[in-house]
């Protein structure tokens, strides 16, 4: 494999994988086909949900839940990490999510979060 092709593949996989918090394994980077169709917005009313099952096998159910009516052709956003405007993070089952700063958003997803305060230190949101 050519070096440039390998670099392209690594960047593509890195930016298209999603970070989730597993109750057993901690932070996981997973390829979730289709999840990259939803762009990030920390203030989105729509939610990315994970439901972990431990019996009979360790597995997870991943889904996007609408937080409001969706009009035909409307772009749907989800929160990729913690929300600076909500103390519980992304709310609901997402409360264990990690709050990314812009350096981490760039590294993981190739984006910059333009919302106010994308850094959390000692459980408090700071403006970046």
Image (cartoon, grey):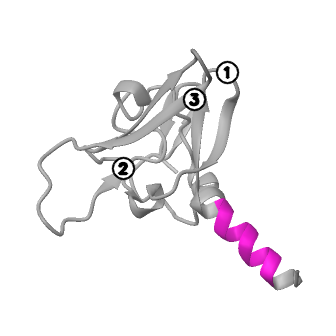
Q: Secondary structure at mark 2?
A: strand
**Dot 3, how many residues are within 10 Å of its Cα: few (below 14), some (14-19), or many (20+)?**
few
Q: Give how far across and how far down residue 103 sits, in percent.
A: 63, 56
Residue 10 counted in the magenta span:
yes
Residue 59: which numbered mark, if any? Answer: 3
Q: Nearer the viewer, mark 1 or mark 2?
A: 1
Reading the chain from its start, which is encountered first: label 1 or label 2?
A: 1
The answer to whether one can see residue 93 in this image is: yes
Marks 2,3: beta carbons within 8 A = no
- Please name the residue that numbered disc 2 is placed on: 78
State the predominant SS element of the stretch in magenta. helix
Q: Is residue 121 above or below residue 57?
A: below
Residue that sits furthest to the front in the current view: 56
Q: Give how far across and how far down residue 102 sits, in percent.
A: 56, 55
Q: Secondary structure at mark 3?
A: strand
Q: Quadrant of residue 91?
A: top left
Reading the chain from its start, which is encountered first: label 2 or label 3?
A: 3
**Dot 1, how many residues are within 10 Å of its Cα: few (below 14), some (14-19), or many (20+)?**
few
Q: Give how far across and how far down residue 118 sits, in percent.
A: 49, 47
Q: Name the residue at 51% across, 62% down.
A: 112
Residue 23 counted in the magenta span:
no
- Say left or right for 88 vs 127: left
The answer to whether one can see residue 83 in this image is: no
Reading the chain from its start, which is encountered first: label 3 or label 1?
A: 1
Residue extent of the magenta highlight? 5-14
Q: Name the residue at 38% across, 41% down.
A: 63
Q: Quadrant of residue 48?
A: top left
Q: Is residue 56 above or below residue 48?
A: above
- Please name the residue that numbered disc 1 is placed on: 24
Q: CA distance from mark 1 to mark 2?
A: 24 Å
Q: Nearer the viewer, mark 2 or mark 3?
A: 3
């Amino acid at each position: 494999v050519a070096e440039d092709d390998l670099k392209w593949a690594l960047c593509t996989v890195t930016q298209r994988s999603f970070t989730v918090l597993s109750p057993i394994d901690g932070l996981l980077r997973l390829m979730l086909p289709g999840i990259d169709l939803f762009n990030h917005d920390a203030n989105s009313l729509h939610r990315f949900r994970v439901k972990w099952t431990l019996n009979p096998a360790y597995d997870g159910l991943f889904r996007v839940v609408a937080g409001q009516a969706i009009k035909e052709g409307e772009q749907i956003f989800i929160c990729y990490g913690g929300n600076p405007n909500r103390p519980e993070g992304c709310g609901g089952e997402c409360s264990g999510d990690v709050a990314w700063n812009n350096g981490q958003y760039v590294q993981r997803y190739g984006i910059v979060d333009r919302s106010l305060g994308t850094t959390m230190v000692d459980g408090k949101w700071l403006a970046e």
